Image (spheres, helix red, strand yellow):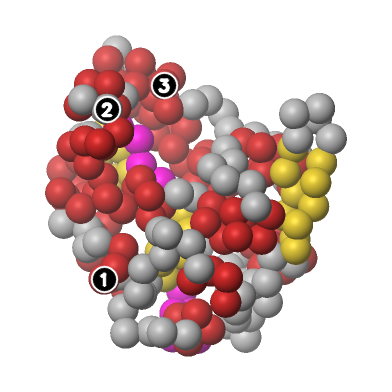
Amino acid sequence: MSAPAQSSRVKLSASFWSHDLSVPLGSDLSPASLFLKNKDFLIVDVETKTLVDAVGGWKNFKQLEVSVACAYDSRTDKFLTYRENELAQLAELCKERLVIGYNVIGFDIPVLEKYGVLPASELDVFDIMIDFHNVSGWKFVKLEKIAKATLGTGKSADGIMAVEWWKTGEVDKIIEYCLKDVEVTRDIFLHGLNKGYLEVEKADESKSRFTVNWS
């Protein structure tokens, strides 16, 4: 799927800045200006070699090592894969794009910092999970719940399985899974951008719909 036309601009509501995880994005104080200056975006997702228990719990999650990172670049309309020794290339690309992800501020970017990726406070970043929390009041919703309700499709596996694949040397399976996550995240972003809402699956498998102010 191609990137949205350059005339499409995402405008975040003021509530985007009201949560604890919000950070100044570069020199931009206005959310709208963030999107006006970034016509190209990069969807980013990482997989790690171990779970957090191996590094002493969530307080040490930044110590996790990356097995694979994948991305979608709207400028080239291509999916990209990076092994651990190639992450410096991803770090450079993050400086040139609006970085988008699901919990990317709370997880992916901090884990990537040791590989040269700048902190979220020094990049232009839009975290779909944080914005969805602001509009819905639902905190830490799994990507799978939004994908199934909004797109009719879900993730192909989970992070636990990706760690098992690393242990058995099945890196190609990790790449396939990570690329699927990137594709799903991209499609959720484009759905919210173009249609103005996301849906989430509830415990009884019914859906709730929430308006997102991205256009």
Residue at 22% across / 21% down in the picture? 54
Quadrant (top left/top right/bottom left/bottom right) for the N terminus: bottom right
* Left or right for 181, reference 21: right
Q: Earlier in the sequence, mark 2 or mark 3?
A: 2
The label on residue 57 is 2
Amino acid tagged 2:
Gly
Amino acid tagged 3:
Ile
Looking at the rendering, which quadrant does residue 151 occupy? Answer: top right
Q: Earlier in the sequence, mark 2 or mark 1?
A: 2
Q: Residues within 10 Å of mark 3 (few under 14, many from 20)?
A: few
Q: Is residue 161 above or below residue 3?
A: above
Instruction: Give the secondary structure at mark 2.
Output: loop
* Left or right for 97, reference 211: left
Picture coordinates of residue 57 (x, y %)?
27, 27
Amino acid tagged 1:
Glu
Q: Residues within 10 Å of mark 1 (few under 14, many from 20)?
A: some
Residue behind mark 1: 122
